């Protein structure tokens, strides 16, 4: 379906909307502007008709959708005319300059069964979505206080034609960005508690705002924080705060650089657990910038599907009411309650970890082809170059940087430390973290396996793993439980985990892989894990499991890096819908010094380690790098959000070394 639209207003913003039309279902049928030259220029570029009179355009152009791109003060009038002419409308912000007018527009749209949308919809931007996910993860706890800045900059310095901005002031052009975003997160504002409006402006500047140039207000949300808002045309463009939004909760803080930003910036979202420095939270999947016309295209699709969305217009009307309330509070020096317009928060993104599907008995159903994993995991092993290192701080840093898959194992001996981190204020909610555990090879007998899993869960302080795996396919002799291993003397740890016979050789146990898998299935039957997996298998060993299993593996974890890409296994797993997790992705000797990784990295703006991680992510494999260096932790999370082209993949594939051994 193609939906014809009529642009009313042909200024700079109309060019930005028009630039995104290709690739949408929208077709520009008409352009109307008081300035005939502007209308004609834009119309001709798109094979559309040009008009200087709105009513004439509405009468002559077959376009069910009007995009209102006029100057601020004209929005309400143009929207009203278009609705009255039975057109769906998408309006630039603000919807209107006063709440009564906004209410009339909403009523008109509703009475006529028309869709009405309004910018900004910046909650859909890549950085805003990342910030929303942090909020939904429960990282901040209850949010008590927000500092919101809407410093549009000295408008006369940067805008070609600032008259419309000077007429309405910084509330209706600037403050609408943080306000819309906060309403989309927290729902409506209850009241404006205090406000002040001042008129600061350089004496030398002849063009002055007719509305106050700088406004400050304190707002209370119905179900949310108190917000201190400053909106300014005076604070210069390069001031330290531009559109910064800082949220403080009981357990942590979140900083978003650019409430209205449309493009991704890996440094834009930062999380700080209470009492700790901010850590950047980069995107772990490729991001797309928001286009101006995207929201219009979405509105058109909804209309085509028979819906008549007005939620963004209700939020916009409420934001107008907040701006009106701030002006009144500034004049009357008192609190002002704000009409809510039934504005609703936008539902938060789904948890990273899909909730387990349960059978009639309420237990998790079998492992599945559709297991959704976070794009990167964090390796929690204590082993580092033959030594044990404490991982508590780095695990906390990884959670702060947005890692949502923790690779743990009873062998690592630090599950109780992870449990402490997950129980601490500011930790992500349980359903927001994917916990992968491993039973050590001395515990493959049924009773040992069940005991090991229960012990690990107790140390972690959770009811069930998201995936529980055999650490190795082959079994060794049992020497006792491995609980809280990190607290025991090193010799004791070694004796328990690497059992030796009288000759100093590893003592194996007579538990076949098939038997061990059946024992692992017993863990699943008891509801102690949502899915099952296996580590360090060959294709032949995987097939042995598949031949006998009742519950198939959802995850296969193997050492995987360019020297050892495990191509056959990865292909087989992909065909079977089994997710591959790459352990030890970076630590192969010499790997990070490979010139080809440096060269590809230069082309893609990644360090060599990032290239290896992006190579895994591009191939649909989830790497679980380990690091104790904060900058590496952030850089590794960022790298998995990047994709490599075929040429780069082939050059990295060529590093394969069939003789590679550790
Ligand atoms: N299932 C199994 O049998 C099995 C076996 C082995 C490992 N694993 C899992 O896999 C995880 C990772 O394996 P691994 O411990 O061998 O480590 P790895 O992730 O392959 O490599 C870690 C090493 O790489 C360095 N590094 C990390 N990021 C870097 C970056 N951006 N630039 C440069 N150097 C970087 C680290 O130093 P910094 O600390 O300075 O960053 C560290 O020296 C383990 O923690 C464990 O969870 C599983």
Image: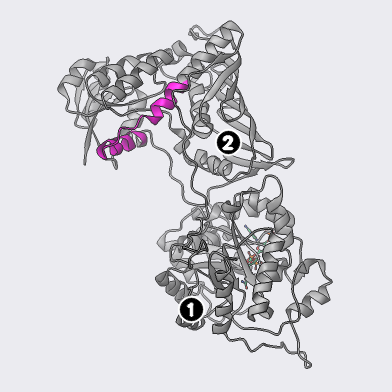
| Percent coordinates x, y for residue 624 in the rendering | 59, 62
Asked whether the viewer can see residue 88, the reply is yes
Give SS at disc 2: strand
Q: In the image, is 653 to the left or to the right of 245? A: left
Most common secondary structure along the magenta stretch: helix
Is residue 504 placed above or below 404 in the rendered structure? below
The Cα–Cα distance between marks 1 and 2, rounded to whole angstroms, is: 48 Å
Residue named by callout 1: 549
Q: Is residue 55 magenta?
A: no
| Percent coordinates x, y for residue 421 in the rendering | 71, 53
Q: In the image, is 634 to the left or to the right of 324? A: right
Q: Quadrant of the N terminus?
A: top left
Asked whether the viewer can see residue 52, the reply is no
Q: Residue furthest bottom?
A: 503
Q: Residue furthest front?
A: 361
Mark 1, other Cα within 10 Å: few <14 / some 14–19 / many ≥20: some
| Percent coordinates x, y for residue 295 in the rendering | 36, 35
Q: Nearer the viewer, mark 1 or mark 2?
A: 1
Q: Which residues are magenta?
A: 295-319
**Residue visible at 51% across and 82% down in the picture:** 541
Is residue 120 placed above or below 140 in the rendered structure? above
The answer to whether the residue bearing label 1 lies less than 8 angstroms from the nearest atom of ligand 1 is no
Out of 635 and 524, give the one closest to the viewer: 524
Give SS at disc 1: loop
**Residue visible at 33% across and 23% down in the picture:** 69
Out of 263 and 546, give the one closest to the viewer: 546
Q: Which mark is residue 256?
A: 2
| Percent coordinates x, y for residue 229 in the rendering | 59, 22
Sequence-first disc among 1 and 2: 2
Q: Which mark is residue 294?
A: none
């Amino acid at each position: 379906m193609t939906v014809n639209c009529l642009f009313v207003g042909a200024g700079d913003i109309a060019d930005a909307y028009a630039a995104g039309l290709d690739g949408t279902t929208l077709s520009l049928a008409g352009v109307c502007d008081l300035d005939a030259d502007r209308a004609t220029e834009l119309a001709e570029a798109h094979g559309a008709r040009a008009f200087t009179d709105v009513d004439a355009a509405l009468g002559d152009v077959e376009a069910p959708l009007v995009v209102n791109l006029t100057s601020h003060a004209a929005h309400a009038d143009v929207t009203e005319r278009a609705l009255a002419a039975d057109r769906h409308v998408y309006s630039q912000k603000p919807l209107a300059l006063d709440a009564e007018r906004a209410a009339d527009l909403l009523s008109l749209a509703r009475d006529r069964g028309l869709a009405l949308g309004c910018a900004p919809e910046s909650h859909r931007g890549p950085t805003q979505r990342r910030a929303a996910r942090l909020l939904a993860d429960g990282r901040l706890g209850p949010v008590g206080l927000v500092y919101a800045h809407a410093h549009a900059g000295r408008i006369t310095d940067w805008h070609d034609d600032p008259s419309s901005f000077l007429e309405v002031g910084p509330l209706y052009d600037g403050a609408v960005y943080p306000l819309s975003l906060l309403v989309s997160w927290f729902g409506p504002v209850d009241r404006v508690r205090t406000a002040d409006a001042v008129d600061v402006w350089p004496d030398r500047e002849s063009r002055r705002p007719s509305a106050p140039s700088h406004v400050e207000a304190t707002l209370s949300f119905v179900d949310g924080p108190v917000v201190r808002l400053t909106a300014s045309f005076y604070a210069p463009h390069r001031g330290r705060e531009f559109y910064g939004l800082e949220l403080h909760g009981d357990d942590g803080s979140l900083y978003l650089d650019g409430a209205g930003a449309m493009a991704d910036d890996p440094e834009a979202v930062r999380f700080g657990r209470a009492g700790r420095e901010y850590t950047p939270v980069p995107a772990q999947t490729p991001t797309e910038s928001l286009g101006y016309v995207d929201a219009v295209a979405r509105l058109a699709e909804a209309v085509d599907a028979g819906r008549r969305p007005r939620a963004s217009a209700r939020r916009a009307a409420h934001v107008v009411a907040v701006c009106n309330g701030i002006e009144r509070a500034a004049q009357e020096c008192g609190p002002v309650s704000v009409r809510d317009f039934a504005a609703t928060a936008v539902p938060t993104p789904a948890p990273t970890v899909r909730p387990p599907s349960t059978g009639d008995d309420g237990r998790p159903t079998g492992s599945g082809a559709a297991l959704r994993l976070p794009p990167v995991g964090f390796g929690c092993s204590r082993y580092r170059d033959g030594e044990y290192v404490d991982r508590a701080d780095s695990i906390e840093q990884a959670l702060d940087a947005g890692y949502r898959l923790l690779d743990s194992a009873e062998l690592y001996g630090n599950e109780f430390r992870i449990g402490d981190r997950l129980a601490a204020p500011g930790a992500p909610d349980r359903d927001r973290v994917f916990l992968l555990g491993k039973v050590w090879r001395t515990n493959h007998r049924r009773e040992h396996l069940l005991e090991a899993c229960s012990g690990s869960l107790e140390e972690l302080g959770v009811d069930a793993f998201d995936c529980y795996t055999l650490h190795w396919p082959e079994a060794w002799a049992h020497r006792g439980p491995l609980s809280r291993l990190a607290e025991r003397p090193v010799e004791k740890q070694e004796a328990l985990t690497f059992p030796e016979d009288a000759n100093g050789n590893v003592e194996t146990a007579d538990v076949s892989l098939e038997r061990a898998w059946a024992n692992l299935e017993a863990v699943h039957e008891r509801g102690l894990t949502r899915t099952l997996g296996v580590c360090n298998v060959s294709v032949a060993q995987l097939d042995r499991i598949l031949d006998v299993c009742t519950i198939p593996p959802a995850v296969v974890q193997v050492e995987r890096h360019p020297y050892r890409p495990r191509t056959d296994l990865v292909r087989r797993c992909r065909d079977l819908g089994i997710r591959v997790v790459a352990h030890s992705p970076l630590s192969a000797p010499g790997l990070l010094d490979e010139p080809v990784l440096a060269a590809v990295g230069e082309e893609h703006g990644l360090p060599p380690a990032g290239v290896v991680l992006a190579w895994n992510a591009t191939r649909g494999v989830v790497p679980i790098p380990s690091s104790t260096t904060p900058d590496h932790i952030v850089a590794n999370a960022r790298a998995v959000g990047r994709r490599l082209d075929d040429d780069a993949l082939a050059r990295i594939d060529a590093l394969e070394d069939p003789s590679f051994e550790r």
